[in-house]
């Protein structure tokens, strides 16, 4: 599909099922529900006396490739975690992500040392975290079980939107068990060293970046991650946190671009025919 095609992303379930792309959105939501069932995320129960449910909503996004063309229609079921009451539904809210300054530093090291750079994507990230708390949620809109509409979902695993950091804890325990050391300055950056080789790993929610000087070390880590979590190997890193990466290893150069994001902004505000304007730097000295 052409990169210039602008598709509205529905804000609600009702908008999705009545939109021109209803079939694609419904398919995406069914895939999300299938993932929930596969991961045994909840069980239907009667709501205990004195307890309240939290709501949920469908977040619907068009995922794009590096060149801006449409990759897929993505549906994510998100809990309305802001309704949770501390001390009743959850204990802690903080879940760290890698700082973008750390990502820029890693990329600078990659360029300077001519390192290998690969990317992995964790599927259904928050489903990897088991819940210690007892949380009840409404059944998802459009997918209530026939004959069981009065039942509620007792969550057995964490999902997007919950104020819980199970996924990070699980990943941290796993990655440090195979020799990676967390960097104190950024708790989502890990390093593994041998006599001559090293591997840097960064984690941003469900995006993993691997940078190292030894391909065998990278492959071993990729295979271990894939066997431990449900992970998709994205190959050489091309797109991270909305930024396109281009590496010219012959010149030890690495460039970052947000061209796709800029094009989407132009599409959104209908500025295709806007006239360019030069900007001049201020003269600071004579």
Image (tube, rainbow, N blue to C red):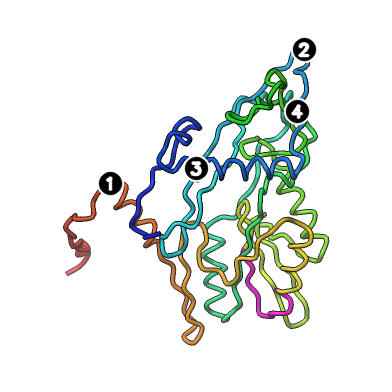
Q: Magenta segment range?
A: 209-218
**Residue 19 screen position, x and y as percent:** 42, 37
Which quarter of the rendered picture does the C terminus lie within?
Answer: bottom left
Do the numbered discs 3 and 2 sit on residues whose CB atoms are within 8 Å? no
Q: Earlier in the sequence, mark 1 or mark 2?
A: 2
Disc 3 to disc 4, C-alpha distance: 29 Å
Picture disc at residue 269: 1
Around disc 4, counting alpha carbons within 10 Å, would you say few (fewer than 14), some (14 to 19), or many (20 or more)? Answer: many
Q: Nearer the viewer, mark 1 or mark 3?
A: 3
- Camera-near label (3 vs 4) is 3
Q: CA distance from mark 4 to mark 2?
A: 14 Å
Which of 207 and 229 lies nearest the eye of the viewer?
Answer: 229
Judged left or right of residue 71, residue 180 is right
Rendered view: 168 above or below 143: below
Q: Are marks 1 and 3 in contact (CB under 8 Å)?
A: no
Locate residue 206, reporting x and y percent.
Answer: 63, 53
Q: Nearer the viewer, residue 27 or 204?
A: 27
In the rendered structure, which disc, 4 or 1, sits on the residue that comes first in sequence? Answer: 4
Residue topped by disc 2? 49
* Among the 4 quarters of the image, the one containing residue 126: top right
Distance (Cα) linking label 4 and label 1? 42 Å
Q: Position of residue 284 (x, y in %)?
A: 22, 64
Q: Which residue is mark 4?
A: 154
Q: Is residue 136 above or below residue 128?
A: above
Q: Mark 3 = which residue?
A: 23
Q: CA distance from mark 1 to mark 2?
A: 50 Å
Helix, strand or loop under label 1: loop
Percent x, y for residue 99? 56, 55
Question: Quick one: label 4 or label 2, which is nearer the N terminus?
Answer: 2
Contact (Cβ within 8 Å) of mark 4 with mark 2: no
């Amino acid at each position: 599909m052409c990169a210039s095609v602008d598709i509205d992303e529905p804000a609600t379930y009702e908008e999705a099922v009545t939109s021109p792309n209803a079939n694609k959105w419904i398919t995406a939501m069914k895939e999300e529900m299938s993932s929930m069932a596969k991961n045994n995320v909840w069980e239907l129960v009667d709501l205990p006396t004195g307890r309240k449910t939290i709501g949920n909503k469908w977040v619907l996004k068009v995922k794009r490739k590096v060149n801006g063309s449409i990759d897929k229609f993505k549906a994510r079921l998100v809990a309305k975690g802001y309704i949770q009451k501390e001390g009743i539904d959850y204990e802690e809210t903080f879940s760290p992500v890698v700082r973008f300054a750390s990502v820029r530093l890693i990329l600078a090291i990659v360029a300077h040392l001519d390192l290998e750079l690969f990317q992995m994507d964790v599927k259904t990230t928050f489903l990897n975290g088991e819940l210690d708390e007892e949380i009840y949620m409404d059944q998802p809109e459009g997918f209530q079980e026939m004959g069981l509409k009065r039942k509620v979902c007792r969550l057995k695993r964490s999902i997007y939107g919950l104020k819980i950091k199970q996924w990070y804890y699980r990943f941290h325990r796993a990655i440090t068990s195979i020799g990676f050391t967390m960097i104190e300055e950024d708790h989502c950056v890990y390093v593994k060293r041998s006599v001559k080789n090293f591997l840097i790993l960064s984690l941003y929610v469900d995006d993993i970046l691997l940078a190292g000087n030894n391909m065998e070390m990278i492959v071993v880590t990729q295979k271990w991650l894939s066997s431990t979590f449900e992970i998709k190997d994205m190959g050489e890193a091309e797109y991270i946190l909305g930024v396109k990466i281009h590496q010219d290893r012959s010149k030890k150069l690495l460039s970052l671009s947000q061209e796709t994001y800029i094009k989407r902004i132009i599409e959104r505000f209908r500025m295709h025919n806007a006239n360019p304007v030069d900007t001049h730097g201020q003269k600071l000295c004579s």
